[in-house]
């Protein structure tokens, strides 16, 4: 009975050691199950030390030692598998062997086998895909129980003289089996709880980050300004439960929400030296309130005591910061650092996406202006010249042409909408063609075949014009004979297809200028509805060129 | 005496308008209106006008290219007419008598007419700097092909017309032998022949100081006495 009490006392010491261990960074190794070699090495050193200390803490009984050595080996085996269990067991076993006594060999051997046995239990659960079970205190208890029984049997078999061995086992079997099984189970239970605790913190933080991410999407469409910053600060405050949130650009505080908003005001210059430093050095600053205290630069009454300043970086350039604050008496987890950084990255990514979208739009607009600008001068002066000529002989015809010209330019100038109906596009093109027909007379013929049911579908504004213009240039400039243009609009294979065909063929190299217009039309359609749509050009040398616009069956919405 | 002129312009109405304006001045006689460069060359060769009103943007062969197909002796004075100011015109500005923007103003045209009359009275001839012709137009059933000068073996003129041999194809052209001699790197070796020096395989000398050229494509072309010496110099022996 005395032995049992003593062993339980020693075991309590182990529990304390294990508890302290569970608070060290090394414990975080146990959060995963994929150990690196160095992880194994650290765990080995820790558990082997624990097992050897178990031997020293032991109580001498009949020239042998009643001890807690098995706890280190069993836990090593359960957590780390056969190799770790065996190594720890062997190390502690060899150590025990050299301490001598008539059970030296039996004890050394059995510790090694006990480590191995626990490792086998580990291997069994891993194989069944239930690694978590090795942290189950019941499993730990049962494993150690079996291991200790095995040790007693080994002592009975190996230790000589046998009479002494029987006497020894009679005294130590019960206390050792009981205290060590209980000890292993308790330590395992402690580990399991600690793991669970970490898990919960981790998952609640990632959930917070996800919720923040979900809610800030779309808030930054107009960039980071005081309005969007205020919204985002509110979201972060609600989702993370920190005491206060501040957002700055490089110069000014854009928003501040939470505790201290009586003196931390948005719209003023950044007062905090630390923030300026974080921006300048492009680094995260964490003032945890314990080793270092945050001193509010504005008010000595400020309740905020710790702060995390995470720079918002776009391509290595700091465009502002996100600051999370905690007040006195509120523990600021180190893990907040990752959260703060994550949120700052999130905001940066959103801004980057918005910026990219904006630039892409800007580019298409600029390109659009380019095609519009391209057509004007030549066409305009030639058209006017033609109308002057016509007016000498046929005033009505000249009047019609002026109407078409005016209609064409009005549509050209008004076109800032992105989409037009096919009907509008055709009207635009028609005005253009009416003038071209008069310019080139019998040199140009135009045939249209249009599925009337498609007139109301929408297509990108200015899709047809560059194609028709290109076809005319082609047909007219490459031919001495009559140029023929055919416009066909029809359904084909679940798509809408617009063919613009000319009989220019390809006598000479394509002009790159007209090619650009078509490229832009193609790019815009692909941007809007995907790469399977767009413009395809087929050219049969010396006979014809067809530009086909392929659109989704419902047009573009 | 009125100024004899040709209008070369692909747009029907623009041609009519130009003719109207020119007739209005009472100083000009419009000999012919042409819708493309080939018609233009033919008309120039046939009518030897004092001046042409030439649109730059013509189909297939533009105005500049057309000028490089006209032989020097019949090269008329040139007034460029275009719808839109382009840098290309600037290059010719110094050499051309004038250039006009469409639509053409009466008063502006009057100035041009004065310039032309002045040049004719002073017997000044046009001296445009015209680049070498790189491609030769060949007319065949409703099509114009532009053949690279380097591809041509030789050019021959006979009673059927002027044609050149390009590989095994025989292509007719409206350009004169003289124009081709002046404007391309082809070499005159006979009254009726131009040869592409790069296509010569061998030269056979005969007794009476005439010779024959065998081309790489195995055609035999005569070399007359008059040109043999120059040919030798050209080839460096």
Image (tube, rainbow, N blue to C red):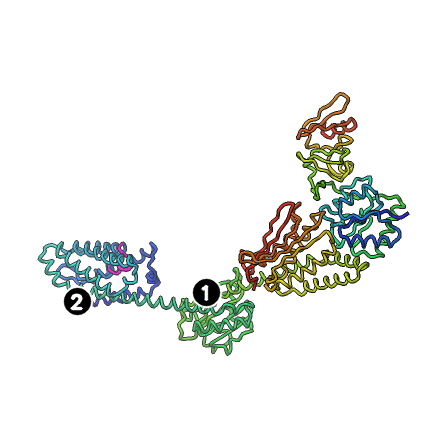
User: How many marks do you count on the picture?
Assistant: 2
Residue at (17% x, 60% y) in the render: A149
Image: A434 above or below B137? below
For numbered disc 1, what is the local secondary structure? helix
Residue A187 is situated, as x and y percent measured from the top left of the image, at: 26, 65
Residue A63 lies in the magenta-colored region: no
A464 or A423, nearer to the observer: A423
Residue B129 is situated, as x and y percent measured from the top left of the image, at: 78, 43
Task: Give the chain letter at badge 1.
Answer: A
B212 or A472, nearer to the observer: A472
Res A291 label: none
Check chain identity for marks 2 and 1: say if they share one: yes
Task: Give the chain letter at badge 2.
Answer: A
The range drawn in magenta is A74-82
Disc 1 target residue: A342
Residue A80 appears in the rendering = no
What is the residue that sits farthest to the right in this orientation?
B1
Horizontal arrangement in the rendering, residue A212 relative to residue A44 (left or right): right
Res A4 label: 2
Horizontal arrangement in the rendering, residue A141 relative to residue B70 (left or right): left
Image: A49 above or below A190? above
Q: How far apart are labels 2 and 1 at the CA level?
A: 52 Å
Are the residues at dot 2 and dot 1 in contact (C-beta closer than 8 Å)?
no
Residue A345 appears in the rendering = yes
> Where, quadrant-wise, is the C terminus of chain A in this rendering?
bottom right
Q: Earlier in the sequence, mark 2 or mark 1?
A: 2
Near mark 2 (Cα within 10 A), the count class, few <14, some 14-19 or many ≥20, is many
What is the residue that sits farthest to the top in this orientation?
B207
Residue at (76% x, 45% y) in the render: B37
């Amino acid at each position: 009975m005395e032995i049992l009490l003593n062993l339980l006392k020693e075991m309590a010491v182990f529990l304390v050691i294990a508890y302290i261990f569970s608070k060290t960074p090394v414990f975080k190794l146990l959060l995963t199950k994929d150990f690196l070699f160095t992880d194994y090495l650290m765990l080995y050193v820790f558990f082997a030390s624990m097992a050897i200390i178990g031997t020293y803490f032991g109580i001498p009984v009949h020239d042998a030692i009643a001890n807690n050595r098995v706890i280190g080996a069993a836990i090593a085996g359960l957590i780390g598998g056969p190799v770790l269990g065996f190594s720890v067991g062997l190390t502690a076993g060899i150590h025990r062997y050299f301490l001598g006594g008539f059970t030296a060999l039996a004890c050394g051997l059995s510790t090694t086998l006990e480590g191995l046995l626990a490792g086998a239990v580990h291997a069994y659960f891993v194989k069944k895909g239930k690694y978590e079970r090795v942290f189950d205190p019941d499993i730990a208890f049962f494993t150690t129980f079996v291991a200790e029984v095995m040790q007693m049997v080994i002592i009975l078999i190996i230790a000589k003289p046998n009479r002494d061995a029987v006497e020894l086992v009679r005294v130590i079997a019960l206390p050792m089996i009981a205290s060590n099984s209980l000890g292993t189970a308790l330590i395992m239970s402690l580990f399991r709880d600690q793991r669970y605790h970490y898990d919960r913190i981790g998952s609640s933080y990632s959930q917070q980050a996800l919720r923040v991410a979900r809610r800030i999407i779309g808030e930054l469409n107009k960039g980071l300004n005081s309005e969007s910053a205020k919204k985002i600060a509110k979201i972060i405050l609600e989702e993370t439960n920190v005491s206060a949130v501040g957002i700055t650009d490089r110069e000014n505080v854009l928003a501040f929400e939470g505790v201290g908003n009586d003196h931390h005001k948005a719209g003023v210059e950044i007062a905090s030296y630390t923030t300026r430093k974080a921006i300048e050095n492009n680094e995260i600053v964490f003032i945890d309130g314990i080793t270092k205290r945050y001193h509010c630069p504005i008010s000595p009454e400020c309740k905020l005591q710790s702060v995390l300043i995470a720079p918002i970086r776009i391509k290595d350039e700091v465009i502002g910061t996100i600051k999370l604050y905690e007040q006195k008496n509120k523990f600021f987890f180190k893990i907040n650092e990752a959260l703060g950084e994550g949120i700052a990255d999130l905001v940066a990514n959103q801004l980057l996406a918005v910026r990219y979208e904006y630039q892409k739009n800007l580019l298409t607009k600029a390109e659009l202006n380019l095609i519009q600008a391209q057509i004007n001068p030549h066409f305009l002066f030639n058209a006017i010249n033609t109308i002057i000529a016509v007016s000498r002989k046929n005033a009505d015809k000249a009047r019609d042409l002026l109407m078409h010209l005016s209609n064409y330019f009005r549509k050209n100038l008004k076109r800032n909408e992105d989409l037009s109906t096919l009907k509008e596009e055709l009207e635009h093109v028609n005005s253009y063609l009416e003038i071209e027909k008069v310019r080139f007379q019998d040199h140009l013929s135009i045939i249209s075949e249009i599925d009337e049911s498609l007139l109301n579908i929408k297509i990108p504004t200015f899709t047809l014009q560059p194609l028709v213009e290109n076809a005319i240039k082609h047909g007219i400039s490459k031919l001495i004979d009559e140029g023929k243009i055919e416009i066909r609009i029809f359904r084909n294979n679940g798509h809408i297809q617009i063919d613009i065909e000319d009989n220019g063929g390809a006598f000479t190299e394509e002009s790159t200028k007209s090619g650009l217009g078509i490229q832009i039309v193609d790019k815009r359609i692909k941007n809007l509805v995907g790469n399977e749509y767009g413009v395809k050009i087929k050219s049969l040398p010396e006979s014809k060129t067809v530009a086909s616009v392929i659109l989704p069956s419902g047009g573009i919405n | 005496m009125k100024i004899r002129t040709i209008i070369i312009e692909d747009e029907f109405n623009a041609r009519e308008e130009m003719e109207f304006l020119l007739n209005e001045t009472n100083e000009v006689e419009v000999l012919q209106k042409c819708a493309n460069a080939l018609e233009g060359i033919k008309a120039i060769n046939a009518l030897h006008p004092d001046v042409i009103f030439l649109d730059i943007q013509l189909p297939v062969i533009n105005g500049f290219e057309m000028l490089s197909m006209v032989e020097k002796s019949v090269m008329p004075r040139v007034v460029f007419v275009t719808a839109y100011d382009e840098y290309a015109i600037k290059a010719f500005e110094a050499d051309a008598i004038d250039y006009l923007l469409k639509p053409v103003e009466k008063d502006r045209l009057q100035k041009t007419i004065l310039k032309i009359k002045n040049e004719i009275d002073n017997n000044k001839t046009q001296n445009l700097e015209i680049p070498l012709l790189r491609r030769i137009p060949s007319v065949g059933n409703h099509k114009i092909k532009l053949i690279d000068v380097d591809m041509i073996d030789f050019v021959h003129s006979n009673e059927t017309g002027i044609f050149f041999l390009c590989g095994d194809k025989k292509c007719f052209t409206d350009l004169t032998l003289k124009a081709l001699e002046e404007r391309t790197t082809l070499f005159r070796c006979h009254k009726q022949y131009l040869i592409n020096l790069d296509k010569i395989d061998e030269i056979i000398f005969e007794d009476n100081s005439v010779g024959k050229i065998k081309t790489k494509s195995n055609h035999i072309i005569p070399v007359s006495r008059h040109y043999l010496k120059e040919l030798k110099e050209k080839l460096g022996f």
